[in-house]
Image: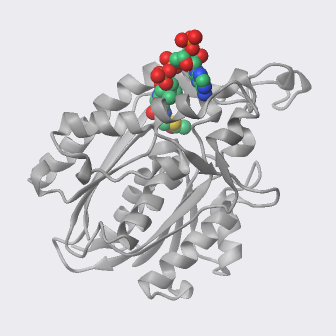
Amino acid sequence: MKRARIAGVGHYVPERVVTNFDLEKLMDTSDEWIRERTGIVERRWVEEGETVSGLGQKAATMALERAGIDVSDIECIVFATMASDHEFPGAGCFLQEKLEIPGIPALDVRNQCSGFLYGLSVADMFIRTETYRNVLLVGAEIQSTGLDLTTRGRDMAVLFGDGAGAVVLVASDEPERGVLTTHLHADGKYTKKLWGQYPSVTHHPRVAPEMLEGDGIYPKMEGRYVFKHAVTRFPEVIHEALKATGYSIDDVDLVVPHQANQRITEAVAQRLGIGMDKMFSNIHKYGNTTAATIPICLSEARAEGRIKDGDLVALAAFGSGFTWASALVRW
Ligand code: ACO
């Protein structure tokens, strides 16, 4: 059976750095509160005119270069994002035009912070079933333009950043290398614990001036509630991947968790019984970039030598939906 091997990984973050001190000027918050509660020091936010597909293109170009694969050899695009450049079509089509590879499928995956792992499982299945040999998987997000940058929205506004990551997956005959297993979950009874209410097709019309008067156009979260679920689901879904493959946590060289909060990452390490040296973290630089987070982490971990050829890497995510997921990858 074919395996999906990660041949190259790349990332791109916007140049504009927004520090906690910058946010102090916009809302009643403090660098101290944000650092202590989340571990975030700064994040990147786009400038006017930057697009989700544009961030994705830059990450994809780096991933293709590192993979040594020509863009014309890509047979399918899977694009994980909560957003697109416009209401529709999905960001995958906008990216495809930029990459100039017409005709191949461009599939958008909308699973918020778990989006990259949902996309990885789809790309993996396309390769395992020998539908496609080379799949470009992108996770890209622009969160900053949708945040409430006043004290009313401070619980959410300080958390999120913009960015993109991408991996090139290629069909391989090596049985113990590549994506070994993926595990996906969702529980829709928690949809409104972390969501964006408006615009909404159930509202007539879906975009109306009164929406701007309230705060319904901004993302909402019951932070503590989400936190409690996250610290349980991360270890649970990592153990599920280990059980499926017969590995133990001691076999894992690096855990790359979705970066939602440094305190969540620390709690997960504790529950897994591993040291923080085995947990990858870059939340201090970028905040939570939703579907872009894991591929940005992979790109940096690879460049820093934290992921070497042959390493066993556990990936896990939790987010809105609620959705949660894991994967085990042998590099
Ligand atoms: N600056 C200063 N004070 C703040 C801020 C802020 N930015 N935000 C909230 N506060 C205040 C609150 O109003 C509250 O004040 P009060 O005690 O007077 O009522 C106090 O700080 C404590 O608020 P909590 O919400 O209890 O703070 P907590 O320690 O839980 O931290 C946080 C909040 C960071 C949001 C945390 O709950 C968290 O990380 N939750 C999980 C996030 C997550 O995993 N999201 C999933 C992925 S996102 C996705 O899928 C799109």
The image quarter in which residue 17 lies? bottom right
The image shows residue 103 at horizontal and vertical percentages of: 63, 77
Measuring 44% from the left and 88% from the top, which residue is drawn there?
68
**Of residues 310 and 186, which is closer to you in this image?**
310
Residue 218 horizontal side relative to residue 76, left or right? right
Residue 75 seen in the figure:
no
Q: Is residue 182 above or below residue 10?
A: above
Residue 233 seen in the figure:
yes
Number of callouts: 0
**Of residues 315 and 12, which is closer to you in this image?**
12
Residue 108 horizontal side relative to residue 115, left or right? right
The image shows residue 298 at horizontal and vertical percentages of: 39, 63
Measuring 13% from the left and 46% from the top, which residue is drawn there?
243
Residue 173 horizontal side relative to residue 213, left or right? left
Quadrant for the N terminus, please: bottom left
Residue 278 horizontal side relative to residue 46, left or right? left
What kind of colouring is applied to the model shown?
one colour
The image quarter in which residue 323 lies? top left
The image shows residue 227 at horizontal and vertical percentages of: 41, 26
The image shows residue 263 at horizontal and vertical percentages of: 38, 33
Q: Is residue 182 above or below residue 168?
A: above
Measuring 57% from the left and 78% from the top, which residue is drawn there?
61
**Of residues 72 and 248, which is closer to you in this image?**
248
Quadrant for the C terminus, please: bottom left
Measuring 41% from the left and 28% from the top, which residue is drawn there?
187
